[in-house]
Image (cartoon, helix red, strand yellow):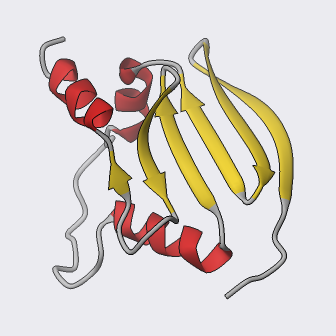
Amino acid sequence: MVSGLDLEARLVISHNGDDIQIAASGTYLIVNIPSQRVLDELTSSNGPEKPKDPGAPNALQQLNMLALQLGLVLDLRVAGKTYVTFGTGRTPKITFNAVLGKIGSFFR
């Protein structure tokens, strides 16, 4: 386990005219995506699906394990509302906002 990792940062990344904000203080990292549409664009796959190893953890679990190993808490937010928190337990914590946002994106 890594110890002593301490971050201080502010970063804005533009993606297709939308600003993705990243801020860090100590061991807490916040990634704020401006809307569900931008999140859907970032997470959509382009091209054929690769075969997945049935025994391998999913991407969310892998990110959670990495955050735990680094001693960081990663808070993924969409439009300022927390969607998923990584690094606080054995599994990522998915919020009700994430569920509602994903359901809403199906109707667009």
Q: Quadrant of residue 59?
A: bottom left
State whether residue 107 is above or below residue 8: above
State whether residue 102 is above or below residue 29: above
Q: Quadrant of residue 13?
A: top right
Tell whether 59 sits left or right of 3: left
Q: How many marks?
A: 0
Q: Quadrant of the N terminus?
A: bottom right
Q: Quadrant of residue 17?
A: top right
Where does the image place residue 7, in percent across and percent down from the top left? Answer: 83, 56
Q: Nearer the viewer, residue 105 or 29?
A: 29
State whether residue 62 is above or below residue 18: below
Tell whether 6 sits left or right of 31: right
- The residue that appears at 41% across and 30% down in the rendered structure is 39
Tell whether 95 sits left or right of 103: right
Where does the image place residue 90, in percent across and percent down from the top left? Answer: 38, 75
Tell whether 31 sits left or right of 10: left
Q: Quadrant of the C terminus?
A: top left
Where does the image place residue 100, in percent across and percent down from the top left? Answer: 21, 27
Where does the image place residue 106, in percent across and percent down from the top left? Answer: 14, 22
- The residue that appears at 84% across and 63% down in the rendered structure is 6
Q: Nearer the viewer, residue 106 or 52?
A: 106
- The residue that appears at 69% across and 37% down in the rendered structure is 22
State whether residue 4 is above or below residue 39: below
